[in-house]
């Protein structure tokens, strides 16, 4: 659906569609209610503090990738703060004990060093386990936490080295953009293979990657699997999705700033794959453009690219009903997860505005960036 955006907005801009986010949160609320689980926002995927008040009534808190995200969760979201990193830097666990309620460790080595401090300060301790369950379908092994030689989670070979009497939460994260079969498969795999450990903890965290708002995700199936798991083990259960909470809730709005021809028509935008849509290059994938189609389908086809010096800074080829011209607007869909949280200012490329499209059509810019944002980071 094409959003009703004002004509005169400054681009590039990431625009959160508040109505779409509220729809996604209804799915989260249903899962929590019907399965009796808790749900956290993984702020690594998406973090827009201006929109957190929309979420705090539904979600139980945030989960962080380290100290800074944890601090943001504590200060801006204000509910439970969980944190996991494959390793913590010097002093990080100490500082985290003042910020996070739940601190997760990756390995026997990390837990031996961090657990005494976490316990002494009354924090709940999680152990991330590598369950040996591969379901992530994106990017080859790039997004599979259980890929060979992965650095994520204690493997079965070392699991008995963990101090289970002191561990509160059994944690797995093994999915990426997975539909319900992936979620259910993981839950059942954990139940089948880790019974003795599950009997010793207070809670289980099934990680992220549950693509709960993606069309085709069978939410009832997830609820049934979680309900059966909880009935069998009597444990509190968490999910910590990022992408699944914000899929299809916003746009990256760009403007054509130049045209070029090299056997094909090329439109150069004020948005860039390299700096603004890194997953387009990393996964790789071709994002949807609202109102456009595959090349050759509509009358006018263009390769869309950014203005950076990187030859590969190409978003994809599309066709449009009308020819593009400098000033034409191009709106990329599904641009909330893993987008602005990963932005860079490579080539001095300006960072896009961050904005909200409210339900009544009001367009609110929550943050604009200028030269300072680029200059500041260079010291
Ligand atoms: C430990 C952990 N939890 C949650 C997530 C969120 O995953 P997603 O955004 O795919 O739901 C990630 C993503 O990498 C993760 O590493």
Image (tube, rainbow, N blue to C red):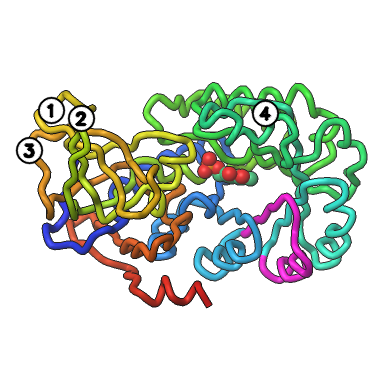
Neighbours of disc 4 within 10 Å: few (<14), some (14-19), many (20+): some
User: Which of pointers 3 and 4 indicates the residue nearer the eye?
Assistant: 3
Q: Which mark, by number, is residue 240?
A: none
Q: In which quadrant of the rendered image does the N terminus lie?
A: top left
Instruction: Decide if residue 109 is in sight here.
Output: yes
Q: CA distance from mark 1 to mark 4?
A: 50 Å
Neighbours of disc 2 within 10 Å: few (<14), some (14-19), many (20+): some
Q: Which residues are magenta?
A: 81-99
Report helix, strand or loop for mark 4.
Answer: helix
Q: CA distance from mark 3 to mark 4?
A: 54 Å
Residue linked to disc 1: 298
Neighbours of disc 1 within 10 Å: few (<14), some (14-19), many (20+): some
Seen at 62% across and 43% down, the residue is 238
Q: Going from the N terminus, do you reach mark 1 or mark 3 first?
A: 1
User: Which of pointers 4 and 2 indicates the residue nearer the eye?
Assistant: 2
Is 346 located above or below residue 302 in the figure? Answer: below
Q: CA distance from mark 3 to mark 2?
A: 12 Å
Report helix, strand or loop for mark 2.
Answer: loop
Q: Is residue 76 left or right of residue 320?
A: right
Residue linked to disc 4: 229
Residue linked to disc 2: 293
């Amino acid at each position: 659906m094409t959003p009703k955006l004002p004509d005169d907005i400054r681009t590039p801009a990431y625009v959160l569609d508040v109505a779409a986010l509220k729809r996604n949160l209804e799915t989260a609320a249903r899962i929590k209610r019907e399965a009796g689980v808790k749900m956290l926002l993984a702020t690594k995927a998406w973090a827009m503090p201006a929109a957190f008040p929309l979420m705090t009534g539904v979600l139980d808190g945030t989960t962080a990738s380290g100290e800074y995200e944890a601090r943001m969760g504590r200060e801006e979201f204000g509910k439970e703060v969980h944190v996991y990193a494959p390793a913590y830097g010097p002093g990080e666990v100490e500082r985290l004990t003042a910020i996070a309620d739940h601190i997760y460790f990756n390995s026997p080595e990390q837990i031996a060093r961090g657990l005494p401090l976490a316990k002494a300060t009354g924090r709940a301790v999680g152990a991330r386990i590598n369950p040996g369950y591969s379901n992530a379908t994106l990017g080859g092994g790039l997004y599979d936490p259980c890929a060979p030689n992965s650095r994520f989670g204690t493997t079965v070979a070392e699991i008995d080295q963990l101090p289970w009497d002191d561990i509160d939460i059994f944690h797995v994260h093994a999915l990426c953009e997975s539909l319900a079969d992936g979620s259910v498969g993981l839950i059942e795999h954990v139940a089948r293979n880790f019974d003795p450990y599950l009997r010793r903890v207070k809670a289980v965290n099934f990680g992220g990657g549950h693509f709960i708002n993606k069309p085709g995700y069978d939410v009832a199936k997830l609820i049934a699997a979680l309900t059966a798991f909880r009935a069998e083990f009597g444990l509190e259960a968490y999910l910590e999705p990022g992408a699944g909470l914000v899929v299809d809730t916003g746009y990256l709005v760009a403007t054509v700033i130049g045209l070029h021809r090299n056997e094909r028509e090329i439109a150069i935008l004020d948005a860039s794959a390299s700096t603004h849509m890194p997953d387009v290059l990393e996964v790789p994938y071709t994002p949807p453009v609202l109102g456009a189609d595959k090349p050759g389908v509509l009358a006018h086809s263009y390769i869309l690219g950014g203005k950076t010096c990187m030859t590969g800074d190409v978003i994809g080829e599309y066709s449009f009903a009308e020819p593009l011209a400098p000033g034409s607007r191009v709106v990329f869909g599904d641009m909330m997860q893993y987008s602005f949280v990963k932005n860079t200012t490579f080539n001095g490329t300006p960072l896009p505005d961050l904005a909200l499209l409210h339900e009544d059509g009001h367009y609110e810019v929550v943050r604009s960036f200028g030269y300072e944002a680029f200059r500041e980071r260079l010291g």
